[in-house]
């Protein structure tokens, strides 16, 4: 699956975002090793701290369906800067997806592609235990 299709899926997922507190809607689409896509959106909570990012929603959906091999994730917002995943998402993506390809897109016309190892160098993981 190419970048455009995965970004389109993340853009569609963003429509389901529940973001009444930040008004910052995020969509994610996670591509598995065998070509399936799991979508996620951010889900906020009045406690603020219980908010879950779009990337983690997509990841946990996929893991709970038994998926274990991942290729790429697309993250879409409408922001004036791109939205590289937060630290908590990076930690979880590293644990379960390894050196994922990350497609960032803003509906304002910005694009970038990263590897997770670029965004998250020197991770703490099972190799440190
Ligand atoms: N958010 C995500 O869903 N993914 C990111 O990569 C960054 C932040 C959400 C969390 C919160 O609902 C809103 O964006 C503002 O931080």
Image (tube, helix red, strand yellow):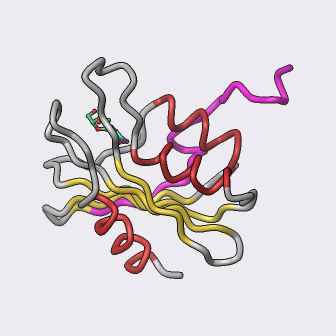
In the rendered image, residue 77, in percent from the top left (x then y), is placed at 24, 53
Q: Nearer the viewer, residue 19 or 118?
A: 19
Taking the spot 25% from the left edge, 44% from the top edge, the residue there is 18
Question: In the visual, does 54 lie left or right of 2?
Answer: left
Count of marks placed on residues: 0
Residue 126 belongs to magenta span: yes
Q: In this view, does 72 lie above or below 92?
A: below
In the rendered image, residue 93, in percent from the top left (x then y), is placed at 60, 43
Taking the spot 57% from the left edge, 67% from the top edge, the residue there is 31
Question: In the visual, does 22 lie left or right of 51?
Answer: left
- Hey, which quadrant is residue 126 in on the image? top right
Taking the spot 13% from the left edge, 49% from the top edge, the residue there is 80
Query: Which stretch appears magenta?
Result: 111-129
- Hey, which quadrant is residue 109 in on the image? bottom left
Quarter of the picture holding the C terminus: top right
Q: Which of 114 and 14 is in front in this view?
A: 14
In the rendered image, residue 94, in percent from the top left (x then y), is placed at 65, 41
In the rendered image, residue 55, in percent from the top left (x then y), is placed at 46, 47
The quarter of the image that holds ligand 1 is top left
Q: Is residue 124 above or below residue 37?
A: above
Taking the spot 36% from the left edge, 30% from the top edge, the residue there is 51
Residue 119 belongs to magenta span: yes
């Amino acid at each position: 699956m190419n970048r455009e299709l995965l970004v389109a899926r993340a853009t569609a997922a963003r429509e389901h975002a529940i973001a009444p507190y930040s008004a910052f809607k995020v969509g994610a689409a996670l591509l598995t090793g065998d070509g399936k896509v799991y979508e996620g959106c951010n889900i906020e909570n009045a406690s603020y701290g219980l908010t879950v990012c779009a990337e983690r929603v997509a990841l946990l959906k996929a893991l709970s369906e038994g998926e274990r091999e991942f290729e790429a994730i697309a993250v879409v917002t409408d922001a004036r800067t791109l939205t590289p995943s937060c630290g908590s998402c990076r930690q979880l993506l590293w644990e379960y997806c390894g050196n994922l390809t990350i497609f960032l897109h803003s509906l304002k016309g910005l694009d970038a592609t990263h590897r997770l190892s670029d965004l998250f160098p020197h991770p703490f993981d099972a190799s440190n235990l």
